[in-house]
Image (cartoon, rainbow, N blue to C red):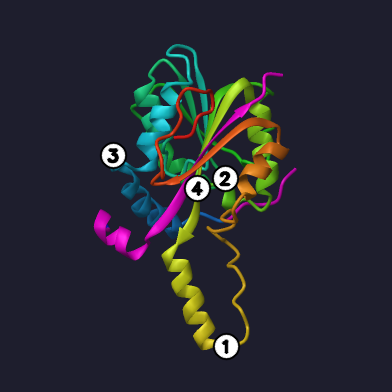
Amino acid sequence: MLSREAFRRAMHLRASRTVASRATGSSAASADFSGEIVELYATLFEQHYHPHGPWAKIVKEAEARVPAQGGKILDLASGPGEPACLLASAIPGASVISSDFSQDMVDKATQRSKDLDNVRCLHADAQDLSRFPTGTFDVVTCCYGYMFCPDPLQAMRESHRVLKPGGTLLATYWTELAAMRACRTVMAAVAPGAPPKPPPINPMALAEAGLVDSMLRLCGFDEVRISPDPPSSPPDLRRPGALL
């Protein structure tokens, strides 16, 4: 397994965290994460457990927004089961659904959550959450998932639909990946004059400044707060939907 420092050196990245609040009032196939990709993803996934990583911050925000008893959380693109398992442990009175488009990921999450009575692991496409009624969840989480959807706007619309009025979406996405810059540099040297096209599975698909904010507002979220990691200034936690 990669050490945290080795991973940081190899994959130096900048991420943004988003909190969006819902106002009170058939999809294409997603990227393929199966087979050996599951094991690779699980290795990278372990690097997020450090105190300043995304899992801890998502849990902290969810704890402030989910009822201690009877709350409902939907974790999209949960991969091997995070932050779903941490959320279930932190808020034992809440019901947590760990979902992923890859059945291999769902199977891994099922194994990891076997000792948690308040977690269900389901196969679900973030772009089609029709199995869930409108206004079901207090919080929807999606960590590094929307950028891998063929139609991220549709996935965000579905997230908004299944949230209760006043509910909150907690999401993360990449804004910078040093490895991607290195790949572009290599490709430009190998094939000068032909700018490389983005890869079919593009982790930088939502990196354009202002893109996520505009997409969430199009979906009906009335309060959107976005912050880079690390934040340049302390977040304002006084208002619902405040940024992590």
Q: Does the magenta stretch include residue 6?
A: yes
Which residue position is annotated with label 4?
Answer: 144
Decide which of 43, 58 is in the foreground and name it.
Answer: 58
Which amino acid does the dot numbered 2 rest on? Phe
Q: Residue 51 carries which label?
A: 3
Q: Is mark 3 on a helix, strand or loop?
A: loop
* Vertical order, 236 against 196 (above or below): above
Decide which of 111, 240 is in the foreground and name it.
Answer: 240
Q: N-terminal of the two: label 3 or label 2?
A: 3
Q: Residue at x 45, y 42 (%)?
A: 107
Image-quadrant location for residue 129: top right
Disc 3 vs disc 2: Cβ atoms closer than 8 Å?
Answer: no
Which amino acid does the dot numbered 1 rest on? Pro
Q: Residue at x 59, y 53 (%)?
A: 209
Which residue position is annotated with label 1?
Answer: 192
Q: Is residue 3 magenta?
A: yes
Which amino acid does the dot numbered 3 rest on? Pro
Which is more foreground, mark 4 or mark 3? 3
How far apart are the alpha carbons under marks 4 and 3? Answer: 18 Å
Q: Residues within 10 Å of mark 4 (few under 14, many from 20)?
A: some
Which is more foreground, mark 2 or mark 4? 4
Which is more foreground, mark 3 or mark 2? 3
Which residue position is annotated with label 2?
Answer: 101
